[in-house]
Image (cartoon, helix red, strand yellow):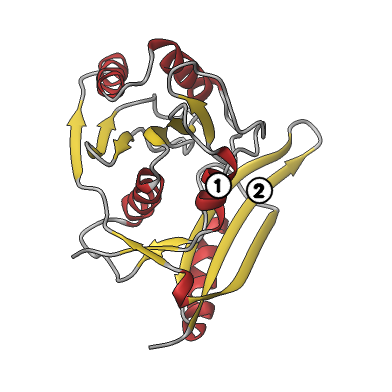
Amino acid sequence: MLKTCYSIRMRAAERSPEIGEKHISGGERIGSKSQIESIVKQLLNKASNHPRGDADFIQITVEKIARDQIQYIPPLEITTVEATSIEMAHSEARKILTSLGVSKHALNVAFHQLGSNQNLRGAIILNSKTGLRLDGRGEKGVRVSRIDWQDTNKELNERVREALALASKVANSPFTIAELCWSDDPDYVTGYVSNRDIGYVRITPLKREGCESGGRIYFVSDEVELKSFIEYLESVPVLIRRD
């Protein structure tokens, strides 16, 4: 077994005088040295062919990590809820999140943020009771990083595979109460709610087609140790593996 592997990360953006930097795409992989070239090509292709626009800034970061630093966790179980309207989908998401202990006020804050923000580059961390934003990073947010599957999961398409890996890492933290997400991609209307008890619940449609608003909200407990939580999300290497 190789003693080292590499975190390969991509961030793509469009820059304009009017809006500054517009987030286009991001990607995360972990692989061996021999896989770096092929992974970089995959990430460049993702950045260069995205419905949010044409990136004029693409950053690829390759970082060596020791295998003994990697945590191995199982994926969340997937279920799907198909609603007849956006309103019904939102109602279902609210119902599930309320059952997990997220307050009505925190939900109102979360839905407003995801429904109105078109340029979130990372997640927003909210107190699950007060709805107070804790990360203080504006549009940059908190980007979950150093995450991948241990093996190729051919049962899932690429979009679901990436989102499930990310949601599984977030849910694995003892500070996470739940997550709410829908994509900022204009052609994708499915989102999800998740935590370690309910798994990964896909809900559609959580927004109208053509809308570029979206992102991720992490609802956390009062006991959250914010520095260590963010350190885990951004820096601890995690591989998802099925038993």
Q: CA distance from mark 2 to mark 1?
A: 28 Å
Residue 235 lies left or right of residue 157; in this view the side is: right
Residue 117 lies left or right of residue 31; in this view the side is: right
Q: Position of residue 139 (x, y in %)?
A: 65, 33
Discs 2/1, front: 1
What residue do we see at 53% from left, 22% from top?
Answer: 113
Q: Tell me which amino acid carries mark 2.
A: Ala
Q: Tell me which amino acid carries mark 1.
A: Ser
For residue 228, the mark is 1
SS for tag 1?
Answer: helix
Q: Position of residue 66 (x, y in %)?
A: 51, 77
Q: Which of these two is toward me, 130 or 111?
A: 130
Residue 54 lies left or right of residue 233; in this view the side is: right
Q: Which residue is mark 2?
A: 13
SS for tag 2?
Answer: strand
What residue do we see at 74% from left, 32% from top?
Answer: 19
As drawn, 144 above or below 113:
below
Q: Residues within 10 Å of mark 2 (few under 14, many from 20)?
A: many
Quadrant housing the N terminus: bottom left
Outermost right residue: 17
Residue 159 lies left or right of residue 201; in this view the side is: right
Q: Which of these two is toward me, 208 or 72?
A: 72
